[in-house]
Amino acid sequence: MAKDYLEEMLGENERILLRARKHWSILFGNIILEIFLIIALIVAVIALLPIAAFPVAPLGFFLVIVPLVGMLRDFLIWYNRQYIVTNRRVIQTSGVFSKDVVDSSLEKVNDVKMSQSFWGRLFDYGDIEILTASEVGANVFRSIGEPIKFKTAMLNAKERLGFDDELGVQAARATNDVPALIAGLDDLRKKGIISEQEFQQKKSELLAKM
């Protein structure tokens, strides 16, 4: 299967944990006028067909193409603006053909702030502000869909940052510590930092090294 643009940027052992976009209401707000214009043109063409002295259908078809192209453009811009959490960083991508990528290492993330208005809580969208120790300082993702899920994924990824690499090194150095490593994995599972599937997979890998 062909990799998409983002997957080609991932480092070794880096994996995507969550993808998010701006809330669907942002897209709807951008295309609502185009939708009304398309409907109005179709209604006008239907109304003029019986009385027009010139070919209305071809002209109407041509005029409808313009807002359709605009609507497709707005959709592609919305679809390609993504906010991604990996096990190492947070990435923001935008652009349909030319791409703009901004990422923040989880190691440099100091705090994550979330704000939701009344409508944001009702329709599940909000702003995520990432405070980092880098020169950028802060990065704000506005009107993102499912902000609580996004923030939780970030915090969990930061808490377990480097755990997989550390576990691999420890397991390679001392197989006698396998029970302790499994106990540590179990603690992470109970805290919700790793899933049951991840726990069982790592447990099997450790037991295989004994």
Image (cartoon, rainbow, N blue to C red):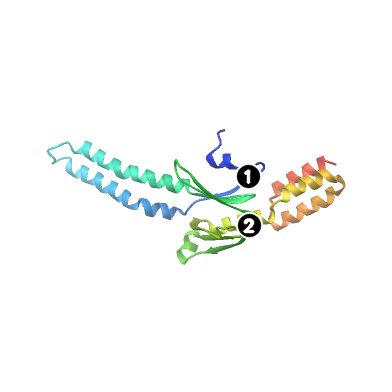
What residue is drawn where x is 42% and y is 44%? 76
- The one nearer the camera, 118 or 166, is 166
Q: Earlier in the sequence, mark 1 or mark 2?
A: 1
Looking at the rendered structure, the kind of residue marked 2 is: Lys
Q: State the residue lying farthest toward the left.
A: 53
Q: CA distance from mark 1 to mark 2?
A: 18 Å
Image position, residue 71 (x, y; %): 36, 46
Image quadrant holding the C terminus, namely top right
Q: State the residue lying farthest toward the bottom.
A: 118
Looking at the rendered structure, the kind of residue marked 1 is: Arg
121 left or right of 186? left
Image position, residue 149 (x, y; %): 57, 56
Q: Is residue 8 above or below residue 119?
A: above
Q: State the residue lying farthest toward the top.
A: 1
Image position, residue 116 (x, y; %): 50, 64
Q: Which mark is residue 154?
A: none
Neighbour tally class for label 2: few under 14, some 14-19, many 20 plus, Cα within 10 Å: some
5 left or right of 37? right
Image position, residue 186 (x, y; %): 76, 53
Q: Secondary structure at mark 2?
A: helix
Q: What residue would you read off at disc 1?
A: 15
